[in-house]
Amino acid sequence: MDQEVKENVVTEKVVVADNSTIVESGASEGGLYGIVQDIVQNPLNLILLSICFYLLWKIIQERFLKKEAPVPKRSPPLPKLPKRDFTLAELRSYDGTASSPDGRILVAINGKVFDVTRGKSFYGPGGAYDNLAGHDASRALATFALGPDAFRDTYDDLSDLTIDQMNTMKDWEAQFQDKYDLVGRLLRPGEAPHDYAIDDEEESSNGPSTGTSTPARVDSKSEIVTSIETKKIK
Ligand code: HEM
């Protein structure tokens, strides 16, 4: 009888041990191995992963690996660009190439134009994000894409963006506002440029206005429309 009980206990242990072995090996298969398998089996994932590695490589290369050209002296920072508005065609010329005025690089997001010359390693020729230079980057940043579909040849009113995409774009806008100088607005076709000299005069008589409020996130499609309409009026 005693012997029988012992045998039962031993058998149960084996079963328990076996189960835990199964559970353990199951966990590891569903975990990292499963993720790797998912990525390898889906060509779209492979493409996205390659793009990520490529961008990461370009950033690391620019930051740490690129041998500094024997520049005798660092060129002094450019003076702040006087505020003005830009048509899409005018914006295009500020792409950081040799033909770009003062070698400046401008990028537009959500109707605002930023001077990103300081971020030349990102946006200058050969940088990871050089195709944003001199462009309206709103759609690219909203959709996290850098391909040709992320840019329009004509003014992009962004009206087809989803709420999430609009909010992603606004987060980028806030980031750029913190890091770079806001130099003006991107004009819609036919829109007249604003005369900032008048603002400067008003500012000197009324005190400075910040002009750098953090963009509000939107919660509904109607707010997106309102946001775009506000852009039209401003
Ligand atoms: C998934 C792949 C990606 C990786 C691994 C990646 C990596 C990075 C890293 C590490 C930085 C910070 C660099 C630094 O501050 O030194 C950065 C900045 C940035 N990334 Fe990416 N990125 C990826 C995709 C993208 C895409 C698809 C876009 C555009 C649609 C994008 C736009 C930007 C921008 C605009 C900056 C900020 C540059 C600045 O500070 O002016 N990235 N990225």
Image: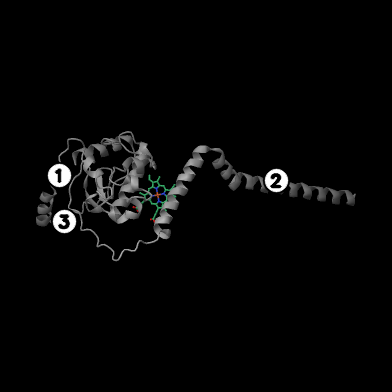
Residue highlighted by disc 1: 194
Depicted 71 relative to depicted 179: above or below:
below
Tell me where residue 46 appears, x and y as whole percent.
51, 41
Q: Are marks 3 and 2 in contact (CB under 8 Å)?
A: no
* Mark 1 or 2, nearer chain start: 2
Give neighbour class at mark 1: few <14, some 14-19, many 20+ (Cα, 10 Å): some
User: Ligand 1 closer than 8 Å to the CB at disc 3?
Assistant: no
Which is more toward the observer, 56 or 111?
A: 56
Which is more toward the observer, 205 or 12?
A: 205
**At 10% from the left edge and 49% from the top edge, which residue is drawn?**
198
The amino acid type of the residue labelled 1 equals His
Quarter of the image where one finds residue 71: bottom left
Give neighbour class at mark 2: few <14, some 14-19, many 20+ (Cα, 10 Å): few
Residue highlighted by disc 3: 208
Local SS, label 1 = loop
- On-image quarter of the C terminus: top left
Q: Image check: 16 left or right of 33? A: right
Tell me where residue 226 appears, x and y as whole percent.
26, 37
**At 25% from the left edge and 53% from the top edge, which residue is drawn?**
103
The amino acid type of the residue labelled 3 equals Pro
Local SS, label 2 = helix
Give neighbour class at mark 3: few <14, some 14-19, many 20+ (Cα, 10 Å): few
Q: Which mark is residue 22?
A: 2
**At 40% from the left edge and 61% from the top edge, which residue is drawn?**
67
The amino acid type of the residue labelled 2 equals Ile
* Mark 3 or 2, nearer chain start: 2
